[in-house]
Image (cartoon, rainbow, N blue to C red):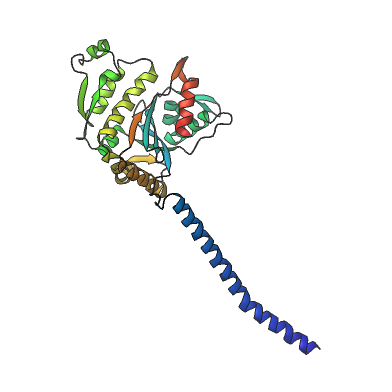
Amino acid sequence: MRSRAGVFWYSLGLTLLVLLPLIGLTAFLVHQRQTQNELRQAAAERGGLPIEQGAQDSWRMLLVVQQEEPAFVLARVDGPEQTVTLCALPGDLQVQAPAGTTTLSACALSAGAGRAAQLLSQTVATGETAVRELYYLAATPACWQDCVGAERTARLDTAALLSKAQRETIGLAEDSVVELTAAEAPELIGRLQSCLEPPGKQADARAAVWEAFLRQNPDLLTALPDAWRTYSARTLTDLMATELGGLEATLEYLTAQPGLTVQYTTAETQKAGPEVILTDSGMQTMQELLG
């Protein structure tokens, strides 16, 4: 009896050793077939057109100009909406911090651009409002100029920012349209800001100039990620290789779209002592950009 039982269990074990791998392989093949059928069905529902790489992705970045008074531009790159939106933020914008409040500039100078991006996200993510990951990229004015190309040009109609009386103070009353190179952009931004009040409006000058360069030079969208790689030793960012590759794919997709829109928007602020805070409208704008 013991001998027969031993033979039985031995035979059962051998059978299971043969069958179990076959059962597992069969289940895997069935799963793969189901997945392929689902993909084919989804493609058929879309008319059989494949989704281009980057078409479904959106990215949010805080671009920082590192200088004595840091400057900030929030950028949203949106594949589904085929838009690139810039929103300049004043350095004295108040953000929430663990010990109370601080400003974007103070945070960037004391704790770095990454911490400034983090506190900005936490400030906007109030109540039930959630925000997506906000990356950051910081560089000096000279590095930003090298990334763009010092000789690259753009035209800016300053009448969209300044009244005629304001333009007279900086010698632009007769012809409001200025053609400038990337090397000349910082000086023009400074001249425009000298005419604008309050600080929230001053920040708009930078967004308007940057928007003009991107809109009139769409190849910049695809050139910037490679420039950031080239000058990686001169920049600070949390965009790793994978994220930078994904951003690059979205920018390449956008550049090929005839409906691409490059624009800038304003997040409204109001004075709160020596600092400024987002108004309800400004907060809604920020939530839309970071959502």
Q: Residue at x 75, y 85 (%)?
A: 6
Taking the image as shown, residue 3 lies to the left or right of residue 250, namely right
- Does 71 appear above or below 236? above
Q: Residue furthest right?
A: 1
Q: Residue furthest top?
A: 165
Vertical comparison of 137 with 285: above or below: below
- Residue 138: x percent and y percent? 37, 36
Where in the figure is residue 273, as x and y percent of width and height?
47, 14
Count of marks, rendered view: 0
Quadrant including the N terminus: bottom right
Q: Up-down: is 81 above or below 87?
A: below
Give the residue drawn at x 33%, y 33%: 262
Residue 94 seen in the current view: no
Q: Position of residue 92 (x, y in %)?
A: 43, 22
| Residue 214 seen | yes
Q: Residue 210's x, y, as percent?
A: 30, 30
Between residue 42 and residue 221, name the one nearer to us.
42
Left or right side of 7 for 94: left
